[in-house]
Image (spheres, rainbow, N blue to C red):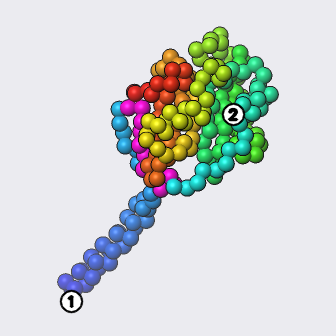
Amino acid sequence: MKKTLIIITSLIIGIAIGLTIKEFLPTNHSYPIKKEKISSIHKVSTTTAQEEAPIIKISQNRALKDFHRLYPNAKVTEIKLTIQHQSYIYDIVGYDTKKDCTIKINASTGEILGQSTLRNEDQEADTEEDTLQINKLVSRKEASQIAIQKVGGGEAREWTLAVTPSHTNPIWTVKIVDHNEVTKVKIDALSKDIINN
């Protein structure tokens, strides 16, 4: 009788511990898993790759005009167009002699979702190398075509154009979706070369 009681008690404790541990373990969600490569192309498997992309109604030029309307003397260092909360959002970053400037714009409605400035007394003198000279660079459309050709198909979904300290020219990073696979391709925005790093 005593052995049976000990066995039953052990089983109940084991079940209770198992149920408690299960509560603290992460649930089985499908998260993107990056396959690291030493190249400019990174493939990521994702369940959201098959979803339709939102519509872009506001051009990059219009978004830049909104940025310069708020910050007339600012130089642009980065433009992102990414999907956030089922809408495309422009994130434009720049600076002037006194502050760093950021603006978020809904690419479907043109609504300014947010803006911020951070005072910067130590801003160095502007140089052409650390700002985006948009009229001299490959367009988003052309960067998309280059990336799709490199991957061998798919659809461009998200874009970043930025000045980086590790590269002489600005870089386009284009996210290509092809079925369940997402690939990021880096392109020199002046020479159109694929960047391998």
Q: Nearer the viewer, residue 68 or 56?
A: 56
| Residue type beneath disc 2 | Gln
Which quadrant would the C terminus be assigned to in this image?
A: top left
* Residue 147 x/y as whole percent: 49, 36
Query: Which residue is identified by label 1?
Result: 1
Q: Nearer the viewer, residue 1 or 138?
A: 138
Residue 121 lies, with reference to residue 114, above or below; the image says above
In the rendered structure, does residue 52 fall within the stretch colored magenta?
Answer: no
Which quadrant would the N terminus be assigned to in this image?
A: bottom left
Q: Secondary structure at mark 2?
A: helix
In the rendered structure, does residue 46 fall within the stretch colored magenta?
Answer: yes
Count how many numbered circles sit on residues in the image.
2
First-in-chain label (1 vs 2): 1
Question: Would residue 57 appear left or right of 148 to someone viewing this image?
Answer: right
Residue most extreme to the right: 69
* Residue 29 x/y as whole percent: 45, 59
Query: Which residue is identified by label 2?
Result: 60
| Residue type beneath disc 1 | Met
* In contact (CB < 8 Å): disc 1 and disc 2: no
Residue 101 lies, with reference to residue 33, above or below; the image says above
Residue 32 visible in the displayed image? no
Q: Secondary structure at mark 1?
A: loop
* Residue 37 x/y as whole percent: 35, 36
Residue 19 visible in the displayed image? yes
Q: Residues within 10 Å of mark 1 (few under 14, many from 20)?
A: few
Say which of marks 1 and 2 sits in front. Answer: 2
Q: Which residues are magenta?
A: 39-49
Question: Would residue 72 appear left or right of 181 to someone viewing this image?
Answer: right
**Disc number placed over residue 11 in the picture, else none:** none
Q: Residue at x 62, y 11 (%)?
A: 127
